[in-house]
Image (cartoon, helix red, strand yellow):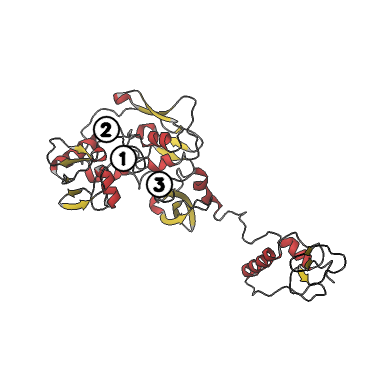
Amino acid sequence: MPTIRVDGVEYAVAGGRTILQALDDLGVLMNGVDVPHYCWHPKLSIDGSCRLCQVEVEGIPKLQIACNTPVKDGMLISTSSERVKHAREGVMELLLLNHPLDCPICDQAGECKLQDYAFEYGVPHARTREARRPAKKRVDLGPTIVFDQERCILCRRCVRFCREIPKTGELGVFDRGDRSLLETFPGMPLDNPYSMNVADICPVGALTTKDFRFKIRVWFLEDVPGICTGCANGCNVHMGVANDKVYRYVPRRNDAVNDTWICDAGRMSYRRIGAPDRLKTPPVAYAEYSLWLKQERPAPDLDPIDVLALSDVIDAVKGLPYSPPPPQGNCGRESLWACTHDTAPAGTSDTDPNVSQVTCTPDTCP
């Protein structure tokens, strides 16, 4: 197992990993070892396009991008030298060159990595005098996502996501150089079962969901860990809660269950919480059960064990102590509508040959 030293601290890491991957495996990336990054994502392929994760490696003349530099035994890495700081300032200045001053109205404000990194690693003043490059705003990419093209920093996370996770490939970067723009392919709207994840992985406010757009500022939300109940997969989520109301689900990383993703149907299932038509009591067979007790309707076609359990639930919801139902028929058995006898009563044919007993109902009980 290789041993590396990062900013004077020694770590034992797995072989065959890059610097960022190794730090992420250890749980210290941006949690003790600050290597800012935009294009790298732990569950996507390596792109190496943003150049913000540059670090200094002893023995290599030029700075190296941590996302695509393999670790090796004895590697000495510096993440906070003057050369590294100067390089980060240059990258941030380039990324902000054409970025609009939308922070007061941007939905990503409060959880925007461009804001955070500009404050932590950028320069205090802009040196540009030229007008920013114009681009499209409020582009409808599909049924779930709105795109502000001028905010995009071309990290290509969304492009790799669509190619690698749902494998639908609706997004791509078109043209070259300073004319590069993110677009959907002609005739291919962004419409797949995981489309809203692109808003989660977008480090800026370029991609936002129609459901959460302009709903509430994120600094008013409390992120409560929870589990999506949309299906049996049990995807881990953060519930955005404010004013005793759930405003959104976003995926919570769990490598054993859902990685860092959640399907659109599960994400939207938060709307069922507190819905006016949501069931508050178990209604299954309750009407038939009540009418049957009054002898106004034949017994419902349910297994006796299920109905006994149902009556317990109904009593618990009503806050009543459980009391067994009254005896039915002449046998004196305390059952809802089924009882057994050693001898078959007249008119019944449901005989159990193993125990020589029969099951009857109030209509056939002797």
Q: Where's residue 196, x and y in %?
A: 46, 41
Camera-side mark, 1 or 2: 1
Q: Is residue 183 above or below residue 347?
A: above
Question: Mark 1, residues whose alpha carbon is within 10 Å: few (<14), some, or many (≥20)?
Answer: many
Which quarter shows the C terminus? bottom right
Q: Residue furthest front?
A: 354
Q: Which residue is mark 3?
A: 260
For image coordinates 35% across by 38% down, the residue present is 102
Residue that numbered label 1 is attached to: 40
| Contact check, label 2 and label 3, Cβ < 8 Å | no
* Residue at screen point 41% across, 36% down: 164
- Kindly identify which residue carries mark 2: 97
Mark 3: secondary structure: loop
Q: Amino acid at mark 1?
A: Trp
Earlier-in-chain disc, 2 versus 3: 2
* Residue appearing at x 45%, y 44% in the figure: 214
Q: Which marked residue is nearer to the observer: mark 2 or mark 3?
A: 3
Q: CB atoms at circles 1 and 3 under 8 Å apart?
A: no
Mark 2, Cα crowd under 10 Å, few <14 / some 14-19 / many 20+, is: some
Residue located farthest toward the right when viewing the structure as drawn: 346
Q: Secondary structure at mark 2?
A: loop
| Sequence-wise first label, 1 or 2 | 1
Alpha-carbon span between mark 1 and mark 3: 14 Å
Q: Quadrant of residue 103?
A: top left
Amino acid found under the numbered disc labelled 3:
Thr
Q: Is residue 358 left or right of residue 209?
A: right
The amino acid at mark 2 is Leu
* Rendered view: 293 above or below 115: below
Within 10 Å of the Cα at label 3, are there few (<14), some (14-19), or many (20+) other Cα atoms?
Answer: many
- Cα–Cα span, label 1 and label 2: 21 Å
Looking at the image, residue 191 sits to the left or right of residue 316; the answer is left
Q: Nearer the viewer, residue 247 or 180?
A: 180
